[in-house]
Amino acid sequence: MIYFWLALDSGGTKISRWKDIMITPSEREFAIKLLDDTRDGLLLMLDGLSSEQLLYCPEPGRWSVAENLEHVIVVEQRLVPALEKLLLEPPDLTTQPAWDDQEVVRKIGTVTKRVQAPERALPKSRWPAEELPREFATARQNTRNFINSTNGDLRHHFIRHFLFGDFDAYQWVLLLGAHSGRHTFHCQGVMASHGFPGRTAS
């Protein structure tokens, strides 16, 4: 929320001012836990996978584990700087989020049907497969640092999702956690498919 008050400028005209209100400690804690839990789940799944396994594609039109992971990294790397830039702008006091927080986590994190990603977020072999887990861990740490330290008014700055409508900046952080959980599920489907190369011996 935002507190308002009225002041007078040098000419005696009333002007409105605002004071940014930070997210609550419980909201911050919830977001950090979601980011940590989904990070740990994804990295645990990736542990021990060879390059051959990461790159295995079960059928045309489905992404490999590496492609899923690259997509997650690109989205995360693009979004956090966009949120930081957005918070420099005045708050938006009229827009309402399309979903509440729990809907963001539940609907983004649940796979009902595949959604075509925007061109800018498609996997394009930006990194060697074996570097992807490290790139993801770095991107997630940057997201975690952002939500852990920001004093910005996340609730009154919005970015429109290309399919689902407006989400506030806090909800976009939740979306990143849920999004990586969603793609962990996709990766598990790839790993369970017939023909997935056997795991390397431990």
Image (spheres, rainbow, N blue to C red):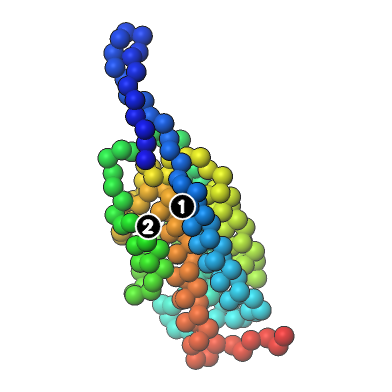
Query: Closest to the observer: 199 or 155?
Result: 155
Placement of the C terminus among the 4 image quadrants: bottom right
Relative to 170, 100 lies left or right: left
Q: Position of residue 33 (x, y in %)?
A: 53, 60
Disc 1 crowd rating (10 Å Cα; few below 14, some 14-19, many 20+) is some
Report the disc number at residue 191.
none
At x 43%, y 38%, the residue is 21
Amino acid type indicated by mark 1: Glu
Q: Earlier in the sequence, mark 1 or mark 2?
A: 1
Placement of the N terminus among the 4 image quadrants: top left
Query: Closest to the observer: 136 or 106?
Result: 106
C-alpha distance separating marks 1 and 2: 10 Å
Residue 48 at least partly seen: yes
Amino acid type indicated by mark 2: Asp
Residue named by callout 1: 27
At x 64%, y 76%, the residue is 47
Check disc 2 and report its element: helix, strand or loop.
helix
In the displayed orientation, state which residue is furthest to the right: 202
Q: Position of residue 9 (x, y in %)?
A: 35, 13
At x 56%, y 62%, the residue is 36
In the displayed orientation, state which residue is furthest to the bottom: 194
Q: Quadrant of residue 127?
A: bottom right
Residue named by callout 2: 101
Q: Position of residue 7 (x, y in %)?
A: 34, 18
